[in-house]
Image (cartoon, rainbow, N blue to C red):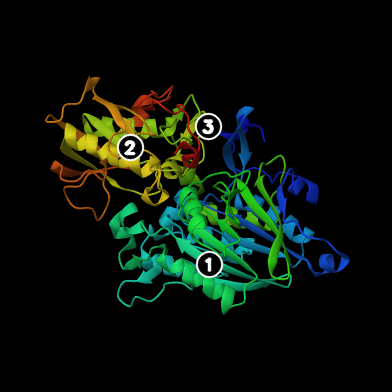
Amino acid sequence: MNLANWKNRRRGPAVAVAVLTSALLLPQAFRVRTACAATFEDDRAKKTITLVYIADLHAQLEPHPELFWSDRGDETAIAGGVARVGFAVQAIRRERPGSVLFMDAGDTFQGSAAAAWTEGKAVVPALNALKLDLAIPGNWEVVYGAQALQSRANELHYPMIASNIRWSDTKKLMFPPYLIKEVNGVRVAVVGFTDPDVPTRQPPSYSRGLTYDDESGLQALIDRVRGEERAEVVLLLTHVGLPKSIGLAERLSGVDAVLSGDTHERTYQPIVRNKTWVVEPGSFGSFLGRLDLTVNEGRVVDRRWELIELRSDRFGEDESIRHIVEETSAPFRSRLDATIGKTEVDLARYSVLETSLDAVLADAIRSATGADAALSNGFRFSPPTLAGPIRESDLWNWYPITTRLKTGKATGKQIREFWERELDHVFAKDPKMLFGGWLPRPSGMKVVFEAGAPKGKRTREIRIGGSLIEDERVYTIAACEREGDAPDTLCRIPHVKDPKVMDMTAHEAVRSYLKSHSPIKNPESGRVRAIDLPQVVRSQAIAK
C-alpha cells in the first residue's frame, strides 16, 4: 500500500498476496542443532513442534504504519492487523499440521480507542478468530480493573495463564499457573509469569484487589512440570521485558526457551543463556515470532528461530478476520476518523531517550498548565503517526487512557533525585532493578546524563528554562495524574508542594494544543541526551 495515500484512506480492500511458501515464512532463520550421532532410527524418533507467538498487540486490530530499522537505515511500511496475523499463522499451520502452538505474551486489551471505549471487549472477537492456544496477561491488562480482566479472560475461547497473580482476599491464583499440551506427540509445558511490579508500575488503582508474586516460586514450578507432569519441552512465557527475561534464563534451570514480552524488543537472533533461548517478537501485530524445536527422546536437539515481519506487501489478510474487525470498528468509525490536527512530520515513539511523538505530548501538557516544566511518561505503545491529518484514533493510540493533569512544586534537589531514580529504572546493570518503560519525556527541561555511571551519579546537568537547576529553588512541574498515588506524589516525584489536580484531561490538553499549533513541524529534540550513547537508542537491552 502506498504510504502517501495511507492517511487519506478510510477503509481499503485486503491486500491480495499469494499463499506463502515455507521458504518465504522462514527467510534466513537462525538455527542451532545439537551435535549427535544421527541414525535412521534417530531421525524417525525425532518430532518437531512449531511455537508461534505475538506480544504487545496493544489492541491494534487494523493494519497501520510501522517503522522498521536495520543497518541499511529506517523504513516505514504498512504492516500488522490481526487479519494479517491470522493469514500468516494459518499458512504455518498448513505447513505444519498438528504441530503448531500459538501463544500471546500479553498487553493485548489496551492501546486503542475501541479497546478503551469498551474495556477491551472490542478486541475479543478478533482474538477468538485467531484461534490462539493460550495467553498470559501483561502489565496493562489491569487497566480497566481486576473484574474487567476476569471478564475478558472468561470471554476468550482459549485459556489465560499466570503463575503469580492472586486475589488479595483469598490468596488464590487468578489463573492456572501453567498449561500442559501435547503437540505432535511432544508433551509441552508453558509456564506463565507476568510483571510483579504492576501494583507500583501502573497507577495503583488499576490492580486493586490483586497481589503479585515475585519469581521465587518459578524454579519449583519448572521442576514440577518437568517431573510430575513429564514435560519434554518447558517454555516460560513472560511479560517482564527482555532484560529481565534474560536474567530469568540465567537463574533458572530446565527451561528450553523464554518467550518474552513487554519491552517491544525485536530479536532477529535469539539470545542464549546456558541452554535456554530468549526471544521477543516486537509489537502491535507487526511481527510474528516462530520457534521450531526438534525433540528426540525428551531432549531438544534442533532449534530454529525466525522473527517474521508482517508487511502488507508480503502477507495478505484473512478475509473472515478482517470482516470481524470491520464489524467491531463500525460503531466507532466516524469518531475514530475525526480530524483533530495535522503534522508535517512523522511522529513515532521508538527510542529509549526521547521521541518526536512524546515531545508533542509533553509540550501540550506544559502549554495547558503554564508550568515551568512538564513530563510525559516513557510509554512504548502506539504505532507511528504519518505526516498528514491527525485523527482521534491517533490520540487514543498515544494516550489509551484518560487521565487528568496534575501540577505541583518541587525543588531542584527533588527533580535531580527523580531523574536519578528514573535513569536507574532504565539503565541499571542488574535486570532486577529495571522498572517500567523508557525515560520520562520532558518539556521546558533538558537533561544530560551518563548511562553507564553508577547508580545515583548519572545526571550531569539539568536545565529548566535554559538555566541550570538549583537544589533549593522551587519549580512548578506538570504531568498526568496517576490514580491511586499519594496526593503529594506527582509522576513518581514524592512530597511535592501545593499539588493540584486539574479538571482538564491529557486528551483535552493535546486537542487544544493541536488546534493552536497545527501543523506540527519539527518537535524540538535533544531534551534528553546521554554522553555515552547515540541519540537514537532503539533497544533498552542493548542500551544498558
Vertical position of residue 400 compared to residue 67: above or below: below
Nearer the N terminus, badge 3 or badge 1? 1
Asked if the residue at tag 2 contacts the one at tag 3, i.e. Cβ–Cβ closer than 8 Å, the answer is no
- Residue corresponding to mark 1: 191
From where the camera sits, is residue 305 visible?
Answer: yes
Residue farthest right in this picture: 40
In terms of image quadrants, where is residue 206?
bottom left
Nearer the N terminus, badge 3 or badge 2? 3
Q: CA distance from mark 3 to mark 1?
A: 39 Å
Q: Assess disc 3: are there few (<14), some (14-19) or many (≥20) residues with their C-alpha within 10 Å of its C-alpha.
A: many
Disc assigned to residue 454: 2
Residue type pointed to by label 2: Pro
Q: Assess disc 1: are there few (<14), some (14-19) or many (≥20) residues with their C-alpha within 10 Å of its C-alpha.
A: many
Residue type pointed to by label 1: Val
Asked if residue 499 lies left or right of residue 189, the reply is left
Vertical position of residue 341 compared to residue 432: above or below: above
In terms of image quadrants, where is residue 11?
top right
Asked if the residue at tag 1 contacts the one at tag 3, i.e. Cβ–Cβ closer than 8 Å, the answer is no
Q: CA distance from mark 2 to mark 1?
A: 35 Å
Closest to the observer: 347 or 105? 105
Q: The residue tagged with tag 1: helix, strand or loop?
A: strand
Vertical position of residue 161 compared to residue 271: above or below: below
From where the camera sits, is residue 162 visible?
Answer: no
Disc assigned to residue 386: 3
Residue 468 x/y as whole percent: 22, 22
Residue type pointed to by label 3: Leu
Q: Assess disc 2: are there few (<14), some (14-19) or many (≥20) residues with their C-alpha within 10 Å of its C-alpha.
A: few
